[in-house]
Amino acid sequence: MLRKALIAVAVISCAVCSGCESHTESKKLAQERWQKSSAGIKLSLAQQQYDEGKYEDAMETVQECIKADPELADGHLLFGKLLLEDGRCEDAAKQLQLAVKLNSELDEAWYCLGTATQEQRDYQQALYYYDKAMTLKPDNAEYILGVVEIHAVQGKFIPAIQLLEQKMIILPKDVSLKVTTADLMCRAKEYEDAAELYKEAILMSSEGGSETESLGYCYIFSGKWAQAAEIFNKLLEESDDQDKKRLYLQTLALCSMNCAQYEKAVNCYSKLTIEERDNAELWMKMGQAALGARSINLAQRCAEKAMDLQAGYSDAIALLGCAEYAGGNYRRAIKTFEKLNTDDKNAGFSWLMRARCYEQLGQKDKAERAYKKAMEINPHTELGDFLVKEKDIGNV
C-alpha cells in the first residue's frame, strides 16, 4: 500500500511539473508572438518619425523593432535608410542586404543598396542593384534614373538615352525623365533633340525655371545665341533671386555680344559695373560692346578705366587702339598698338591694326612691312583669323 501511495504521489508530482513547464512554455511563446506583433506596430511609428525627419528617434525605435523581431525585413530596410542618411554606407549596405535576404521582393531595399554601393564607387554592383529594383517596379522613375545615372557616370550615354526613350513611352507625363534625357543629349551634343525635350518639360512643369535655364544653355552650346538671349532675358525679368539675376545678366551680355546685339550688351555690362566698379574685365567687355555699337567715345572711356584698374591690361590696350582707329585717330592708335609689341597674345593683331592705320594714312610701305610682321608672328594664321579677333573686339 505504501509503495502504491508513493507511486501515485510521484505521478501527480510529474503531472503538476509537466503542467507548469507547459504553462511556462506557452507564456514564453505568447510573449514572443506579442513582441513580434508589437515590433510591426512600432515600425509604423519609426517610419513616421523617419518621414518627419526625426532620424535619431526613428533610429532608436527601429533598433527596438529589430531586437524584438530580427527577421523583420522592413525593419532592416528602414534601419539601412537611416544609416544612409547618417553617411554610414557600409553599415547601411549590411542592413539592406539582410532586408533583401529576408524578402527579395523589397524593391526599395534593392534601390537603397544601389545608392549605398554607388557612394562607395562600385558602379557595376550599384548598376546590378538599381536594375533589380527597376525590374521589380519598371514604372518607378526614381529606379530608372538610378540605372541611367550609373550609365552616365561610366560615359555610356547611348544606352542611358535608349533606356530613357523606352521609359518615356510608358511614363509620358514624367518631367524628370524628359529633363534627364535632354541633359544627356546635350552632353552627347544632340542639341536639337535636347531643346525639343526641354520645351516639352517647360510646358508640363508648373514652374519650369530650371528647365527654361537648361534650354537657354542648350541654345548656347548649339550656337543659337539669339534664342539663348531671349531665354535669359525672360529669366532675368522673372527672377527675384539677386545672385541668379546677376548670373542671368552676365549670360545675357555674352549672348547679346555673340548675336551682335551690342547695345543690349552695353546695357547689361553697365548694370553689372554698378556693383563691381573695380572689375577691370567688366569695363573692358563693356568697351567691346560699345565699340560694336559704334559708341566710340564710350569704348575709349571703358578701355581707359580698365587700364587704370589693371596696369598693362593687354586686352584693354588693344580695345583702346581699336577705339582710336574707329574714331579716325590713326597716329594715336599706332602708338597704342606699339605697346603690345612684346605681348604674346596680341602682338600679331597689333601689327595687323598698325598696317591698317598706315594704309589709312597712305603709308603703303610701312603698311606692307606691318602686314609682313603680323604674318611672321603668326605664320600659320590666315588673315581671316585676325578678322575673327577683330570682330571679338568690336566692329572696327
Image (spheres, rainbow, N blue to C red):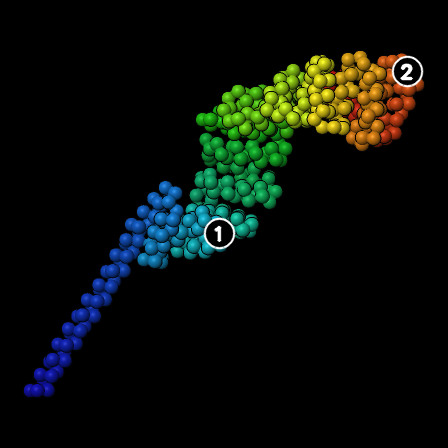
Element marked by disc 2: loop
Q: Residue at x 51, y 27 (%)?
A: 241
| Disc 2: CA contacts within 10 A as few (<14), some (14-19) or many (>=20) | few
Q: Which residue is mark 1?
A: 89
- Let me know if residue 154 appears in the view: yes
Kindly tell me whether residue 200 is visible in this rendering: no
Q: Quadrant of residue 304?
A: top right
Per the rendering, the mark at residue 42 is none
Of the 4 image quadrants, the one containing the N terminus is bottom left
Q: Position of residue 71 (x, y in %)?
A: 36, 57
Identify the residue at horizontal 74%, vertical 26% (top origin).
Answer: 315
User: Which residue does the numbered mark 2 point to in the structure image?
Assistant: 363
Of the 4 image quadrants, the one containing the C terminus is: top right
Q: Position of residue 153 (x, y in %)?
A: 58, 43
Residue 103 located left or right of residue 258: left
- Mark in front: 1 vs 2: 2
Q: Quadrant of residue 347?
A: top right
- The 10 Å Cα crowd at callout 1, few under 14, some 14 to 19, many 20 or more, is many
State the image coordinates of residue 277 (x, y, percent, origin top left): 63, 24
Q: Secondary structure at mark 1?
A: helix
Q: Is residue 290 left or right of residue 335?
A: left
Give the CA separation, mark 1 to mark 2: 76 Å
| In the rendered image, the vertical position of residue 122 relative to residue 226, given as above or below | below
- Residue at point 65% right, 26% down? 278
Which amino acid type is shown beneath numbered disc 1?
Cys
**What x and y, as percent, mark residue 334?**
84, 20
Seen at 25% across and 56% down, the residue is 34
